[in-house]
């Protein structure tokens, strides 16, 4: 009752049974010890009965340990069946050895419950391993066919157990004998039929495991292949028990116990891998070493027995040669076999995490398979989730437009592991990995994630650059279209009507030439003034696109000319710039930003003056336009002009910030880092010998420097 009531809930919501786990461990240890003592005292010769005893004895040790591990970490239904297998196997082994001990020491008490245990104690656990456990070793709910198979297996197991508990014809009696006439015949017939159903149900369960192994995602296939092999071996081992007498004579007596022993090379490892998954907290090394030792020992012993048997049959006249030859071959193959077994066990327990190169290869395949750069991070996150058996994985990228890519497996997740992503020493995102619910990330998985951080950081950086480039292209295209629309409006609404008015005026002047020549002259004078104004307007439009002085003399003269154009408008523009040379793309972008900023001051700020300052130091280039006007309200959305300034700054690798000024008004600040200017400087240095700036400011078109100075 205490074992049933004591429940510990893990942080992931999993239910553990620690008291039950320790009760199972103590019970199996006592049965194991008692069986060993009886076996030593009885000293019975080795035979078929001792092979079956070895099966029960091994069941007690192996499945008792596995049940203890599982119950400590997870209250899975399989754990209770494993506990029944371990305790039942130990009780059956103890009963068999105690009967042998009674033959040597007949004066000992002979309780029926113990002496008959070898006939009934092993049935619930061992048969459940064949017909029930393979269906239960899974995550989530079972489908209807699986539930029907489990119910059928449970009924067959219960029927066989009932017959073995009540059959009165057993040599040492039955715990619950039924002395009804005809019951013995029912037991004989029913027991044979039910034992014939056991291998069929076992093969059906193995087929179900194989189907899941072939159809489920990679993360859910771990251990299912081993489970299928163990189920097939157990099903085959019980097949002779249901054969008719004529068929059974052709089957070796030792086949059943040997197959049962062989299945234990697969069943425990599969259960630990599938049921516990990442719950081997603190015992990974012990579990791996135990499985490697057990499997290696089994393989070497099997190889020795098979080799000696075959060579004995081939070389009957030289009995010493087979043993020596097989011993040499087994010794030579021990180390390669150990390496292969170690890799298999590591892959079984840890999945792809034991082979970081395999994970990198899978991530690389997912990156190369993504045609859209936006899908790259999603593919990487899903690859990490599948290959490392994570509950979920996210790759988060910071920046002006933050975004995240997610990959997830079915079911809830546990606690996250957050790893920073950096580029050039600057953190720009995070790799977040969640364990599955009730699990936590083991050392191998954590190490694999740490090894993969540079790869993920590179993929995230490339994806972020691709997204930024696509966004920049879209914004540049929008700004270009807006400039075209603005130019169209200026031409259509300004220059077009003006030219139409000039044409009408010329027609009117022509009509007046013969009637009133003096009035015609005055009209022509007004038309000339209007034409001069429109010519100046066209020049303003051209200067707004690319002022000639900027390409001919540099940025500073272009800014001074810009300031002079506003003198008649009542706005005092003061330009302060240190002497320096700027590449033409940079100078053009800076001029466009300053021109737009000054235009905004004139139109919207209500200020009498503004100040333009251009500086360059070791950190880069700084351009600042300040005014003392009314400023910009914080809740006012950015218009075309502000977006245009930001796009121009981003186009040369800089940043444009519009904020309130220190003494009021508005300050437009453009920052271009030194590393962005260094590439332009190198290009200018290469161009200087033959095509650099000349005395009048001209130079190569590609890298022509624009002089900044008074």
Image (cartoon, grey):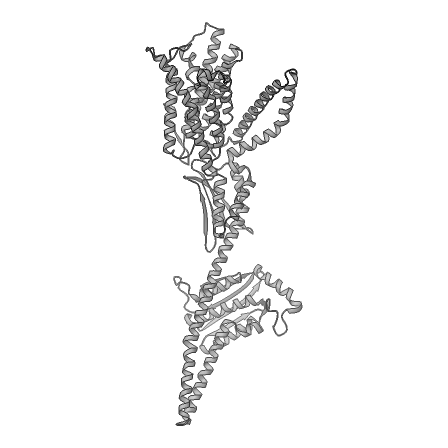
- Identify the image quadrant of residue 636: bottom left
* Relative to 457, residue 112 above or below: above
Residue occupying the point 49% across, 43% down: 383
Outermost front residue: 246
Q: Is residue 174 left or right of residue 445?
A: left
Outermost top residue: 107
In which quadrant of the rendered image does the N terminus lie?
top left
x and y percentages locating residue 696 in the rendered image: 62, 74
Number of numbered tags placed on the structure image: 0
Residue 439 in view in this figure? yes
- Identify the image quadrant of residue 320: top right
Outermost right residue: 689
x and y percentages locating residue 544 in the rendered image: 49, 72
x and y percentages locating residue 443 in the rendered image: 52, 36
Residue 661 in view in this figure? no
In the image shown, does 395 or 269 lie closer to the viewer? 269
* Relative to 524, residue 271 above or below: above
Residue occupying the point 49% across, 12% down: 38
Residue occupying the point 48% across, 6% down: 105
- Identify the image quadrant of residue 523: bottom left
* Relative to 141, residue 32 above or below: above
x and y percentages locating residue 587 in the rendered image: 55, 68
């Amino acid at each position: 009752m205490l074992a049933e009531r004591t429940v510990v809930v893990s942080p992931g919501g999993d239910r553990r049974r620690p008291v039950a786990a320790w009760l199972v461990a103590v019970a199996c240890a006592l049965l194991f010890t008692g069986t060993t003592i009886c076996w030593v005292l009885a000293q019975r010769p080795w035979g078929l009965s001792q092979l079956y005893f070895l099966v029960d004895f091994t069941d007690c040790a192996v499945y008792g340990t596995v049940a203890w591990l599982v119950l400590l970490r997870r209250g899975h239904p399989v754990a209770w069946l494993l506990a029944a297998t371990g305790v039942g196997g130990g009780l059956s082994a103890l009963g068999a050895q105690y009967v042998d001990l009674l033959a040597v020491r007949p004066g000992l008490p002979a309780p029926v419950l113990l002496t008959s245990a070898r006939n009934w104690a092993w049935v619930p656990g061992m048969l459940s391993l064949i017909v029930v456990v393979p269906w239960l070793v899974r995550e989530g709910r079972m489908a209807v066919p699986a539930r029907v198979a489990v119910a059928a297996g449970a009924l067959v197991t219960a029927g066989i157990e009932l017959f073995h508990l009540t059959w009165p014809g057993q040599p040492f009696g039955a715990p619950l004998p039924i002395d009804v006439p005809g019951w013995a015949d029912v037991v004989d017939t029913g027991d044979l039929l039910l034992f014939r159903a056991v291998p069929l149900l076992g093969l059906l369960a193995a087929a179900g495991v194989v189907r899941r192994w072939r159809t489920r995602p990679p993360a859910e296939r771990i251990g299912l292949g081993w489970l299928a092999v163990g189920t097939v071996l157990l099903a085959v081992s019980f097949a002779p028990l249901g054969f008719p007498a004529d068929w059974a004579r052709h089957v070796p007596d030792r086949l059943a116990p040997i197959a049962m022993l062989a299945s234990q090379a697969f069943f425990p490892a599969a259960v630990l891998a599938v049921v516990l998954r990442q719950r081997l907290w603190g015992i990974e090394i012990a579990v791996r070493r135990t499985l490697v030792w057990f499997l290696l020992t089994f393989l070497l012993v099997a190889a020795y027995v098979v080799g000696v048997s075959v060579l004995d049959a081939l070389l009957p006249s030289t009995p010493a040669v087979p043993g020596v030859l097989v011993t040499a071959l087994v010794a030579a193959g021990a180390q390669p076999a150990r390496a292969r077994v170690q890799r298999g066990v590591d892959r079984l327990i840890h999945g792809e995490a034991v082979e970081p190169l395999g994970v990198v290869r899978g991530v690389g395949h997912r990156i190369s398979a993504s045609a859209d750069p936006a899908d790259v991070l999603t593919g990487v996150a899903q690859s990490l989730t599948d290959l490392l058996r994570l509950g979920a994985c996210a790759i988060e990228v910071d920046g002006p437009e933050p975004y995240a890519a997610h990959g997830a497996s079915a079911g809830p997740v546990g606690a996250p592991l957050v790893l920073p992503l950096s580029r050039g020493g600057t953190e720009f995102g995070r790799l977040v990995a969640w364990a599955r619910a009730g699990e936590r990330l083991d050392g191998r998985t954590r190490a694999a994630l740490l090894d993969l951080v540079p790869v993920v950081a590179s993929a995230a950086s490339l994806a972020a650059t691709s997204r930024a480039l696509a966004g920049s292209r879209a914004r540049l295209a929008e700004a270009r279209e807006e400039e075209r629309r603005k130019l169209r409006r200026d031409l259509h609404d300004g220059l077009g009507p003006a030219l139409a008015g000039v044409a009408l005026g010329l027609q009117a002047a022509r009509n007046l030439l013969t009637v009133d020549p003096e009035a015609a002259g005055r009209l022509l004078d007004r038309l000339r003034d209007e034409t001069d104004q429109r010519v100046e307007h066209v020049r303003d439009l051209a200067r707004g696109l690319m002022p000639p002085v900027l390409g001919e003399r540099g940025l500073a003269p272009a800014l001074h000319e810009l300031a002079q154009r506003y003198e008649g408008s009542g706005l005092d523009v003061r330009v302060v710039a240190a002497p320096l040379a700027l590449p033409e793309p940079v100078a053009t972008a800076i001029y466009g930003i300053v021109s737009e900023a000054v235009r905004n001051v004139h139109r919207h700020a209500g200020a009498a003056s503004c100040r333009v300052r251009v500086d360059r130091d070791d950190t880069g280039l700084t351009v600042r336009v300040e005014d003392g006007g009314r400023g910009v309200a914080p809740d006012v959305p950015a218009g075309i002009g502000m977006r245009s300034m930001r796009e121009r700054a981003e186009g040369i690798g800089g940043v444009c910030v519009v904020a309130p000024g220190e003494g009021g008004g508005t300050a437009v600040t453009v920052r271009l880092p030194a590393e962005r200017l260094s590439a332009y400087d190198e290009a200018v240095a290469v161009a200087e010998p033959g095509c650099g700036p000349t005395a009048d400011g001209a130079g190569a078109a590609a890298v022509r420097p624009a002089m900044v100075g008074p």
